[in-house]
Image (tube, rainbow, N blue to C red):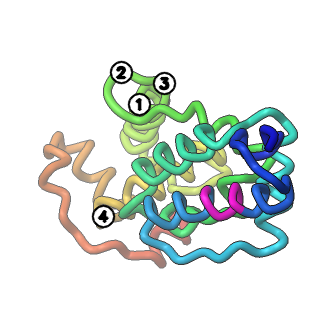
């Protein structure tokens, strides 16, 4: 018996343990997300590519934990899937993703929210041209999660109405039209 370079466990055949590694990673993803992904060639290629970059099983588990906490019950929940989570350009970011009190994500959101309030006070339209991609995407997501519209948000900010009182249904035509 030898230590398998893929699974870091004792094994007789490395190829068999490579399959065990894929199974363990996908089983963990399914357990954390409540999904039912299967082990397909495209997923194997993504896992193996991250493995060759030096990431190991605990890294995959941490990515699953981080992004499940961040995306469950949000519009991003649909991205809790192997093709997104194991993407070369995103994996390390997901591994180091922090969400909670006092972290970089919260600080970034606060800055974007402040810019959103500035735009509302300036009576700017909700459009990528006027707000920029990052702020527009944040504002759209924020408004959608709170089931409100851009005009209603602007009205409430200008009139100093507490944001907790914003309960209007989302008007997607208004949002997409920049109203």
Residue 118 in view: no
> Which residue is rendered at x = 84% and y = 72% of the image?
41
**Structural distance between the alpha carbons of marks 2 and 1:** 6 Å
- In contact (CB < 8 Å): disc 1 and disc 3: yes
Marks 4 and 2, how far apart at CA: 27 Å
The residue lying at 58 percent from left, 31 percent from top is: 96
What is the C-alpha distance between the residues marked 1 and 4? 21 Å
Return the residue at label 4. Answer: 148
The numbered mark at residue 102 is 2
**For mark 4, does the 10 Å Cα neighbourhood hold few (<14), some (14 to 19), or many (20 or more) residues?**
many
Q: Which residue matches tag 3?
A: 104
Q: Is residue 5 above or below residue 136?
A: above
The secondary element bearing badge 2 is classed as loop
- What secondary structure prevails in the magenta region? helix
CA–CA distance in space, label 1 to label 3: 5 Å
SS assignment at label 4: loop
Label 4 or label 2, whichever comes before in sequence order: 2
């Amino acid at each position: 018996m030898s230590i398998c370079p893929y699974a870091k466990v004792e094994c007789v055949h490395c190829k068999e343990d490579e399959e065990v590694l894929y199974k363990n990673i996908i089983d963990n993803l399914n357990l954390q997300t409540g999904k039912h992904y299967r082990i397909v060639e495209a997923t194997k290629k993504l896992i193996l590519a991250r493995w060759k970059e030096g990431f190991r099983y605990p890294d995959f588990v941490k990515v699953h934990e981080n992004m499940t906490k961040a995306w469950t019950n949000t519009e991003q929940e649909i991205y809790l899937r192997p093709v997104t989570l194991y993407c070369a350009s995103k994996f390390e970011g997901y591994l180091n993703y922090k969400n909670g009190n006092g972290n970089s994500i919260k600080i970034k959101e606060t800055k974007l929210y402040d810019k959103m309030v500035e735009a509302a006070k300036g009576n700017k339209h909700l459009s990528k041209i006027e707000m920029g991609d990052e702020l527009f995407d944040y504002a759209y997501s924020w408004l959608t999660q709170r089931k409100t519209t851009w005009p209603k948000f602007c009205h409430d900010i200008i009139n100093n109405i507490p944001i907790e009182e914003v309960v209007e249904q989302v008007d997607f035509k208004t949002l997409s039209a920049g109203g």
